[in-house]
């Protein structure tokens, strides 16, 4: 693939990504939605965040993976505890990263 | 007479923008690591550094970009690459739909500009903040723009510095994004209904991943969780009336 084709493909990918990102915001954002849809959308943030979080935790190299040797699982519980106790994103990330980095350092 | 000094409009704008930047800071190490990895991978697969940087500037979607690199290297038709990008970006439909009810105050072109920079981390922050308070426009856009600038800059580092960036995972950077999402998910849950939806959404995600739903997983799991939450809400309302 020559450089012009790669650039045009990248521009096309950008257009596709923008259309998908902008679609609901432009179509739904400016008008009052029917009550059942408004009620259903109320639950979308929790559902979407849970789906993304779980995917980030269980997918490694594109495949579903659970392993007791994976230090990120050991860091998960303390991170959840810090999130519940402090409600601080920064502290949760800092504690989680420190546990993962420390475990890897000890494991060599 | 009130002695308090009111900030100027410019001062208020900087204050709001600064708050947006501070909120997104925990996600930036993870963004940088992924963007550097993309830069290294693209250049290793024969894509020129300037095109690698342009791709990040035009697309701003990590998974879609990472998937496109081997397809470009293999010389697959652009239509196949665009179709793959569309499938991978399907998760943005759920994110955009979740944000839509809270961004009605923006003009259509502001919504268009905002949507161009929706990504997992700023979505998570804004979807948590917007139902609780009127988030100033400068705060919204600052969080999005700083993510975008860091994404493109880190891609440039990966494309130019290449392998010398080393293994950033030893600093636990690969856990930054999951930890941030854990914190934001915990912050989103304010009642039993939302907790049930989150647990259900998580279980559906694992089932879909095991079934091979791959890039459709987030959209499908979020929709299923949303439908389950609404059904539970409707059933509870009928029972109590």
Image: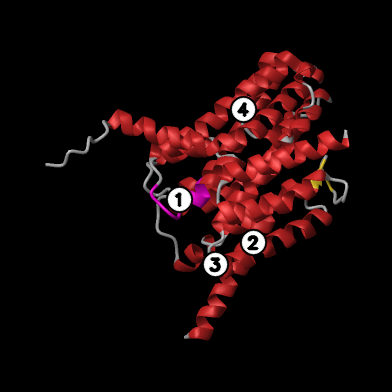
Q: Which residue has dot 3 on it?
A: B191
Residue A28 in view here: no
Which residue lies at the image location 68% right of the left edge and 18% below the top edge?
Answer: B157
Q: Do marks 3 and 1 both belong to one polypeptide chain?
A: yes
Of marks 3 and 2, which one's residue comes earlier in the chain?
3
Quarter of the figure with the N terminus of chain B: top left
Q: Which residue is mark 2?
A: B198
To which residue does mark 1 refer? Answer: B130
Chain letter of the residue carrying label 4: B
Q: Residues within 10 Å of mark 2 (few under 14, many from 20)?
A: many
Q: Determine the CA span between mark 3 and mark 2.
A: 11 Å
B44 lies above or below B197: above
Crowding around mark 3 (Cα neighbors within 10 Å: few <14, some 14 to 19, many 20+) is: few
Residue placed most toward the observer, B147 or B174:
B174
Residue that badge 4 annotates: B151
Mark found first going from the N terminus, 3 or 4: 4
**Gap in Å between the C-alphas at discs 3 and 4?**
35 Å
């Amino acid at each position: 693939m020559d450089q012009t084709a790669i650039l045009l493909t990248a521009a096309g990918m950008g257009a596709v990504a923008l259309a998908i990102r902008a679609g609901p915001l432009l179509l739904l954002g400016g008008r009052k939605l029917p009550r059942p849809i408004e009620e259903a959308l109320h639950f979308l943030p929790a559902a979407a965040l849970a789906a993304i979080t779980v995917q980030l935790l269980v997918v490694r190299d594109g495949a579903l993976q659970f392993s007791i040797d994976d230090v990120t699982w050991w860091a998960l519980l303390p991170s959840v505890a810090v999130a519940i106790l402090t409600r601080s994103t920064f502290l949760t990330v800092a504690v989680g990263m420190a546990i993962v980095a420390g475990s890897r350092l000890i494991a060599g | 007479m009130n002695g308090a000094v009111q900030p100027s409009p410019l001062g208020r704008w900087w204050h709001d923008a600064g708050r947006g930047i501070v909120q997104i800071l925990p996600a930036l190490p993870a963004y940088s690591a992924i963007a550097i990895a993309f830069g290294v991978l693209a250049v290793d697969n024969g894509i020129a550094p300037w095109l690698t940087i342009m791709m990040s500037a035009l697309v701003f979607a990590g998974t879609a970009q990472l998937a496109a690199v081997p397809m470009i290297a293999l010389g697959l038709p652009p239509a196949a690459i665009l179709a793959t990008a569309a499938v991978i970006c399907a998760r943005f439909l759920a994110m955009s739909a979740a944000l839509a009810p809270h961004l009605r105050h923006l003009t259509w072109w502001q919504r268009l500009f905002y949507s161009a920079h929706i990504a997992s981390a700023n979505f998570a922050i804004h979807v948590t903040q917007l139902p609780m308070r009127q988030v100033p426009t400068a705060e919204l856009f600052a969080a999005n723009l700083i993510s975008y600038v860091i994404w493109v800059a880190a891609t440039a580092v990966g494309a130019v510095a290449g392998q010398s960036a080393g293994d950033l995972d030893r600093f636990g950077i690969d856990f930054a994004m999951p930890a941030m999402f854990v914190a934001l998910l915990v912050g989103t849950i304010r009642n039993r209904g939302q907790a049930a939806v989150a647990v259900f959404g998580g279980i559906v995600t694992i089932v879909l991943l095991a079934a091979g739903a791959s890039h459709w997983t987030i959209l499908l799991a979020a929709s299923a969780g949303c439908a389950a939450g609404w059904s539970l809400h409707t059933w509870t309302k009928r029972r109590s009336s």
